[in-house]
Amino acid sequence: MPDLLIELFSEEIPARMQGKAAEDLRKLMTDGMVEAGLTYRGARAFATPRRLTLFVEGLSAGSPTLREERRGPKVGAPEKALEGFLRGAGVAREDLEEREEKKGSFYYATVITPGRPAAEIVAEQLEKTIRGFPWPKSMRWGAGGLRWVRPLHRILCLLSDETGDQVVAFEVDGVTSGQTTEGHRFMGDGPFDVTSFADYETRLKRAHVILSADERAEAIWNDATTLAFARGLEVVEDRGLLREVAGLVEWPVVLMGEIGADFLNLPPEVLQTSMKEHQKFFSVRNPGSGRIEKFITVSNVETADHGATILQGNQKVLAARLSDAKFFWENDLRVATAEGLTAWTARLENVTFHRKLGSQAARIARIAALARKIAPMVGADADLAAQAAEVAKADLASEMVYEFPELQGLMGRYYAQAAGLPDAVAAACQEHYAPLGPSDDVPTAPVSVAVALADKLDTLTGFWAIDEKPTGSKDPFALRRAALGVIRLVLTNGLRLHLDRLIDAQLLRHQIAPAASDADDLKEELLAEIARHGVFGAAVRTIVDRFDGDGPDWIAQVRDHTPDTSDDLLGFLHDRLKVHLREDGIRHDVIDACLAMPNRDDLSLLVKRAEALQAFLGAEDGENLVQGFKRANNILTQAEEKDGVEYSYGADRKFAEDAAETALFDALDAAEARIAGAMEAEDFAAAMEAMAALRAPTDAFFEAVQVNADNQVVRRNRLNLLSRIRRTCLQVADLTRLEG
């Protein structure tokens, strides 16, 4: 069985495209070859800046001959139907066979598809792959019609086995396949022929090309950390940058350069971001001081002066870049120190957040109002939380964040400290964006938590208010990320919040039109009551009813408010919670069983209940009791449907005829008392442990008695006893929603 080697050699492929392009080449070729009847043992794809390579091991020598029988129209069918069948099958009329079946006689054709050699199939599939390759961006050059990411120079396509090698011959827009490649652009010795993948990989390395991107990345990291360690320094780890730099070079040469003394006092994050974004440099840190003191650059060529000229040029360009960063930093510090952060927040009045949601300044005002309401719920000072929310996004108007948007929040912390604001406010400026992803740290400082929650809830309620929700895979405003952020903030900090009340209050804040200044205090009082007690709370109704159909226009919006939108948003949060908990091994039906219980907007309580139920179901008694509950529920439901009554009036021990019935009464009495106390204390594990004690008496009851007895008094009593089992078990979770 031969091996297949393919190389598509071109001008430089952008680093960001290389990994996917290699995978696309592997998938398109292997899928196409398998569909054409070839088999293979394994396939590996590689990418360097100038080549995509595919190695397929153990390819079959050709596709098998296929014999297929096709049933055609009925004998005597119209001539046109028969002609169509003959064309589709590719056979002549005399090749047809008539067969008698139950429904009459039918024509049958035997279609033979001859096998083809592997070279023919590979050539056909590779040409198709090249012409239709899914580059994100591609170009044409010269007079040809082929589109490729950069001009394509060579196609290497070779089948090889122990007997020798064979070029798979074909041509694409003037580029003819062969067995020739070339090494490094500057350090290679020109074109050379290869005979197999092992020969290809060895000769490439000899020509200063490392084929594997992982090997190049490992070489860069090892050399960089060794250089830094020798000087008592450490390289700041950045796996994304490492992957990108490995895609920029075929023969990595690691060099360490100096940062000018004028720039060493810049914040380390500024240095790191500037060097990464503009120069693709790694930062080298002093572990003692935390300062960025040097940089690592990766050259694609070995030089006689060991990189001295390269470093000189890089340091000159870097100095120009860092001069800009230093100017932004010093200018921003002057503004923060002299005028405070309000100088920037005022500018945000002219920056639109969303055309339907107003300016950034209006958004900040909403977040500050909500943060003030959330603060006492999370143990934060309300004034500090409001102050932090008012300045948290001020750095969006700073010059540094304008140049480096990825530094938003972090620069806010520096500027807040420079302006003399409290430490809790400065920390919130940086932390209120978190968590940004599933692995991001979650803020725990109370003021930061209050502002982070307010920020994310305002975003979610705002886009729900204007009906701009995520659809399918589209989520342009990162609302799924915001929802996951709310969930992680609540769960990590063990917060006990009624999210539906906060959602209602903020939805109304979005929906209520700007009111007259004399009504602002009343509006804030009303929204505060909604956040604490819900939109239908007594205090809210008292305020609304005070106007008796009169008053500001926004009063009518509160009066007519329905929970539909807030329920929909809460459902969205629950969906995100299911995804989050699934990673922790909690089944989705377990979460559904807990969502059916009261206080489902209290995520901490919900998760506590779900974890207890998951553990309960993992025990033998728990799983068996659920089956007993379902049996009781099914019998009871069928009886209620048949009789047209509800059996929930209480079973009486005096009608018990069997010892198993009496034992079940005793077990229910004991379990109900324990469950009531445990539920009061929100100790769901204890409640379920008490519920598990019902397993044995329930099993014994079903084994000993017939529920639908002939005596109607006994039957009704036993059905009421089943109702008691159902009611007792449903106190903890809705077990009817469990699968299986």
Image (cartoon, grey):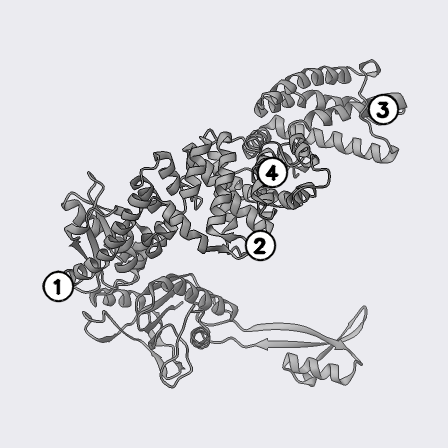
Residue underneath mark 1: 309
The N terminus - image quarter: bottom left
Residue at 19%, 65% (x, y): give it: 301
Q: Relative to 463, is 15 above or below?
A: below
Total tally of numbered discs in the picture: 4
Element on which disc 4 rests: helix
Q: Relative to 629, is 574 above or below?
A: below
Label 3: how many Cα within 10 Å (few below 14, some 14–19, many 20+): many
Q: CA distance from mark 3 to mark 1?
A: 96 Å
Q: Is residue 253 visible?
A: no
Image coordinates of residue 311 in percent, x first then y, are 15, 60
Q: CA distance from mark 4 to mark 1?
A: 64 Å
Residue underneath mark 3: 716
Q: CA distance from mark 1 to mark 2?
A: 54 Å
Residue underneath mark 2: 468
Q: CA distance from mark 3 to mark 4?
A: 41 Å
Q: Point out the tag, 3 or 4, that comes first from the N-terminus.
A: 4
Residue underneath mark 4: 500
Q: Nearer the viewer, mark 3 or mark 1?
A: 1
Q: Amino acid at mark 3?
A: Arg
Label 4: how many Cα within 10 Å (few below 14, some 14–19, many 20+): many
